[in-house]
Amino acid sequence: MTAILTTHGLCKNYRGIKAVQDADLSVARGGITGLIGPNGSGKSTTIDCITGFTRPSSGKVSYDGQDITGSPSYGLAGIGLVRTFQNVRVYERLSVMDNLIVASQSLRAHGWLPLMLRSTAVKADEKAIMQEALSFLELVGMAHYAGAPAGILSYGQRKLVALAACLITHPKLIVLDEPLAGVNPTIIRKISGLIETLNEQGLTFLIVEHNVDFIMRHCDHVIVMEQGKKLTEGKPEDVRRDERVLEAYLGKRVGLETKGTAYA
Amino acid sequence: MSVSTPFSTSSDAGVQPRLTWPLVVLSLAGLILLPSIWPSSYVVNVLILAFIFAILATGLNLIFGYTGLLSFGQVGFFGLGAYLYALLTMDGGVSPWLSILLAGIGSGFVALLLGYPALRVSRASFVIVTLSVTLLAALLARNWVEITRGPMGIPRLPAPSIDLLGLGTFSGHDPHVFYYIALAIAVASIGAIYLLVNSPIGRVLRAINLDEPLAASQGISPKKYQIAAFAVAGILSGIAGSLHVSHLGIVDPSIFDPYYSEMLLIIVIVGGPGSFWMVVVSSLVFMAIPELLRMAPELRMVLFGMVLVLAAMLFPTGVGGYFEQRKLAMWRRSLRS
């Protein structure tokens, strides 16, 4: 399988703190890649570098055959790379429908005058987008709420709307930052199912997640990070058995006698 | 838990949408007929000032209420437009009508140039830069005597006049004529902003205001929209400023007076930033009521200050925001049942 996204020697320093060091990652086209690691291991900084929210200190990011290192975040949706955020973001004071219409890119292609005067082309486009938005809302099970302000939705429902807003941009690769954190089991099942379905339709995912059960069940490739570096990668079942991964999460296995001396 | 879905794509919070248009048409008809019903030139002059402030406040509403950037530069562009009008008509020999247009375009252009550096760092730095620019403009108006004539100002400015073929020329120096000129320009410029904020562009502006990183992740360049909105708000301020001095007949550095800034903020904050019609109504109310009640000028500023403090405490999101809160509460109730 070819890679849709690769990073080479990706580094990000914050005044001496090396948040990400020399990360070489690769996301296979058409797959679901998991990015795991303990808190503070540099997962979020890595995806911020990939999606243009911070500029890497050094290294290279390539997506779909293009060098996108340091390109601004707003330049990436147009080439099919979108993301969600750890603390889910929706436009709270806009309706759910408007959340999706804003995310859709085809309206923005029109000039300002036709947009202001709502020319027939703009009207037709808007109507098509509303239809499309409704179909995505139906897919995530939020069509009932199309007219409701997004601010009244629960945390999990917002995650579903955020996912629908990603889909309406017609992405090739979706980067999900902890899609399941803080969400009830019903919606976890819902999101897992959606990711599976969308992946079958050809969408590629890069997922940062702490829910090990989810990672093991749905990812076909897992990358483990620790203290800013890539610790290991491979198939979920191999990674699970890796001694170093357990160590990174739980600490070193130590014998009783050495523990005794440590306290002495 | 099924909820009916009324698609409200025009998300202007405020009065019930069904009532808005009849009310707008009715008020406009009232304003057109008013001088014939109540021909006092005092009333007419007060309303002219209200129209000018409605233009200015709608500009601030665009940049502050919709785009979320608090600009103290609007009074600066108001003064800039005023001086541009004076210089174009007096020194440039340009006709008053064209000068109003050019004053608007000129102010918008300066805003465009200013927007980029002002937005480089943060929204907070934008506030400071725009405040500084207004203070700087006032300083220039006082001290660049060769161009601005200094504190004495530029007197005897012409006013635009209406030339109706066959009926003769109506001079804008007559308040009753100027009333209709100001009303027409206000309707045109406020109408244009109405179209803008209710178009997909307005929706994007609100989105950027609500969550800039999210908008960027969806392929929207926040800065591009913010600078454009700032330029459009600058155009409105410039038009309002030129209109104001063409009516007064003189421009001097007092055009940058804090009175204008304070009035403008009260109008937008009490009306409700981001509520289109509430801000327009509030400009008319705040210009007309104190004048008609003939309050002492010294006391008036104190009262306005109190109104601003009270509004910030009781209606932090303005009257328009209050309506929006009620709409939200209604949604919550309908979801619970």
Image (spheres, rainbow, N blue to C red):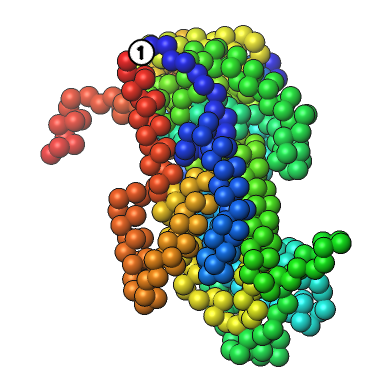
Residue shown at 57% from the left, 30% from the top: B9
Dot 1: what SS?
Answer: helix
Q: Is residue B337 above or below residue A80?
A: above
Quadrant that contains the C terminus of chain B: top left
Quarter of the rendering occupied by the N terminus of chain B: top left
Image position, residue B86 (x, y; %): 71, 78
- Residue at mark 1: A185
The residue positioned 40% from the left and 22% from the top of the image is: A156
Q: Determine whether B323 is above or below A131 in the image.
A: below
Note whether residue A87 is visible. Answer: yes
**Residue A26 to residue B256: above or below:** above
Q: Amino acid at mark 1?
A: Pro
Q: Residue at x 76, y 38 (%)?
A: A114
Q: Residue at x 37, y 27 (%)?
A: B330
Q: Residues within 10 Å of mark 1 (few under 14, many from 20)?
A: few
- In the image, B319 versus B147, the foreground residue is B319
What is the chain letter for disc 1? A
Q: Where does residue A93 sit, x and y in percent of width and height?
A: 46, 35
